[in-house]
Protein backbone atom coordinates (compact mmCIF):
# COMPACT_ATOMS: atom_id res chain seq x y z
CA UNK A 1 0.00 0.00 0.00
CA UNK A 2 1.04 3.57 -0.64
CA UNK A 3 1.90 5.73 2.35
CA UNK A 4 -1.37 7.68 2.03
CA UNK A 5 -3.23 4.38 2.27
CA UNK A 6 -1.28 3.26 5.35
CA UNK A 7 -2.88 5.86 7.56
CA UNK A 8 -6.30 4.52 6.58
CA UNK A 9 -5.49 1.05 7.91
CA UNK A 10 -6.22 0.76 11.65
CA UNK A 11 -2.98 0.07 13.53
CA UNK A 12 -4.43 -3.01 15.23
CA UNK A 13 -5.25 -4.65 11.90
CA UNK A 14 -1.95 -3.90 10.13
CA UNK A 15 0.35 -6.81 9.52
CA UNK A 16 4.09 -6.44 9.18
CA UNK A 17 4.42 -4.49 5.97
CA UNK A 18 8.16 -4.33 5.40
CA UNK A 19 10.56 -7.25 5.54
CA UNK A 20 13.98 -6.31 6.89
CA UNK A 21 16.68 -8.80 5.98
CA UNK A 22 19.76 -9.03 8.18
CA UNK A 23 22.67 -10.53 6.28
CA UNK A 24 25.77 -11.08 8.39
CA UNK A 25 27.71 -13.80 10.10
CA UNK A 26 26.01 -15.37 13.15
CA UNK A 27 28.34 -13.65 15.59
CA UNK A 28 27.19 -10.24 14.29
CA UNK A 29 23.47 -11.05 14.04
CA UNK A 30 23.33 -12.43 17.56
CA UNK A 31 25.39 -9.62 19.09
CA UNK A 32 23.86 -7.44 21.77
CA UNK A 33 24.13 -4.23 19.67
CA UNK A 34 22.38 -5.88 16.70
CA UNK A 35 19.64 -7.28 18.90
CA UNK A 36 19.16 -3.83 20.44
CA UNK A 37 18.75 -2.28 16.98
CA UNK A 38 16.30 -4.94 15.82
CA UNK A 39 14.19 -4.74 18.96
CA UNK A 40 13.59 -1.05 18.26
CA UNK A 41 11.81 -1.84 14.99
CA UNK A 42 8.07 -2.14 15.70
CA UNK A 43 6.69 -5.57 14.79
CA UNK A 44 3.50 -3.89 13.60
CA UNK A 45 5.47 -2.42 10.71
CA UNK A 46 8.56 -4.61 10.24
CA UNK A 47 9.18 -8.34 9.98
CA UNK A 48 12.81 -9.24 10.65
CA UNK A 49 14.40 -12.07 8.67
CA UNK A 50 17.89 -13.04 9.74
CA UNK A 51 19.72 -14.85 6.96
CA UNK A 52 21.17 -18.06 8.35
CA UNK A 53 24.95 -18.25 8.18
CA UNK A 54 24.79 -21.59 6.37
CA UNK A 55 22.51 -20.04 3.75
CA UNK A 56 24.86 -17.09 3.24
CA UNK A 57 27.91 -19.30 2.91
CA UNK A 58 26.54 -22.31 1.03
CA UNK A 59 23.46 -21.33 -0.97
CA UNK A 60 23.33 -19.33 -4.19
CA UNK A 61 21.90 -15.83 -3.75
CA UNK A 62 18.82 -16.86 -5.73
CA UNK A 63 17.88 -19.06 -2.75
CA UNK A 64 18.41 -16.39 -0.06
CA UNK A 65 15.28 -14.98 1.59
CA UNK A 66 13.71 -11.99 -0.12
CA UNK A 67 13.38 -8.68 1.70
CA UNK A 68 12.33 -5.11 1.15
CA UNK A 69 15.21 -3.65 3.12
CA UNK A 70 18.67 -5.17 3.67
CA UNK A 71 21.13 -4.65 6.49
CA UNK A 72 24.43 -6.38 5.73
CA UNK A 73 27.72 -6.25 7.60
CA UNK A 74 31.08 -7.51 6.48
CA UNK A 75 33.20 -9.48 8.92
CA UNK A 76 35.80 -12.22 8.59
CA UNK A 77 34.43 -15.03 6.45
CA UNK A 78 31.47 -13.01 5.14
CA UNK A 79 30.97 -13.43 1.38
CA UNK A 80 30.67 -9.75 0.50
CA UNK A 81 30.65 -10.39 -3.26
CA UNK A 82 27.64 -12.68 -2.82
CA UNK A 83 25.85 -9.98 -0.82
CA UNK A 84 26.54 -7.48 -3.63
CA UNK A 85 25.17 -10.02 -6.12
CA UNK A 86 22.06 -10.45 -3.95
CA UNK A 87 21.54 -6.69 -3.90
CA UNK A 88 21.80 -6.57 -7.71
CA UNK A 89 19.37 -9.47 -8.07
CA UNK A 90 16.66 -8.52 -5.56
CA UNK A 91 17.10 -4.73 -5.43
CA UNK A 92 16.16 -4.18 -1.77
CA UNK A 93 16.65 -0.83 -0.09
CA UNK A 94 20.16 -1.23 1.37
CA UNK A 95 20.79 0.48 4.70
CA UNK A 96 24.56 0.36 4.43
CA UNK A 97 26.30 0.57 1.05
CA UNK A 98 27.75 -2.86 0.27
CA UNK A 99 30.04 -1.59 -2.47
CA UNK A 100 31.55 0.89 0.00
CA UNK A 101 32.25 -2.00 2.35
CA UNK A 102 34.41 -3.58 -0.36
CA UNK A 103 36.51 -0.42 -0.29
CA UNK A 104 37.41 -1.16 3.34
CA UNK A 105 39.15 -4.35 2.24
CA UNK A 106 41.93 -2.42 0.48
CA UNK A 107 43.94 0.15 2.46
CA UNK A 108 44.96 1.98 -0.72
CA UNK A 109 41.31 2.53 -1.65
CA UNK A 110 40.53 3.74 1.86
CA UNK A 111 43.41 6.20 1.64
CA UNK A 112 42.22 7.47 -1.76
CA UNK A 113 38.67 7.92 -0.44
CA UNK A 114 39.97 9.84 2.56
CA UNK A 115 42.11 12.06 0.33
CA UNK A 116 39.08 12.86 -1.85
CA UNK A 117 36.99 13.68 1.20
CA UNK A 118 39.63 16.11 2.44
Image (cartoon, rainbow, N blue to C red):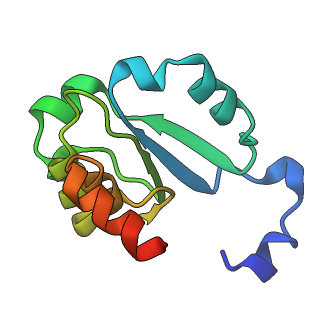
In-front residue for pair 4/113: 113
Image x and y of residue 69, in percent:
49, 57
Up-down relation of residue 72 to residue 56 (above or below):
below
Quadrant (top left, top right, bottom left, bottom right) of the N terminus: bottom right
Up-down relation of residue 1 to residue 22 (above or below):
below
41 with respect to 79 (left or right): right
Image x and y of residue 57, in percent:
15, 31
| Residue plotted at (76% across, 42% down) | 42
| Residue plotted at (59% across, 43% down) | 47
35 with respect to 15 (left or right): left
Up-down relation of residue 24 to residue 45 (above or below):
above
42 with respect to 49 (left or right): right
Up-down relation of residue 31 to residue 103 (above or below):
above
In-front residue for pair 37/75: 75
In-front residue for pair 12/79: 79
Image x and y of residue 117, in percent:
47, 73
Image x and y of residue 64, in percent:
25, 44
Whether residue 86 is visible = no
Q: How many marks?
A: 0
Quadrant housing residue 112: bottom left
In-front residue for pair 73/11: 73
22 with respect to 100 (left or right): right
| Residue plotted at (19% across, 50% down) | 106
| Residue plotted at (43% across, 54% down) | 67
Whether residue 78 is visible = yes
Quadrant housing residue 25: top left
Amino acid sequence: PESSQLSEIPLASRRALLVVGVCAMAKKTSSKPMQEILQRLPSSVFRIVIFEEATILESPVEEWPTCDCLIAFYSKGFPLRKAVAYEALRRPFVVNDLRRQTLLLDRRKVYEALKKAG
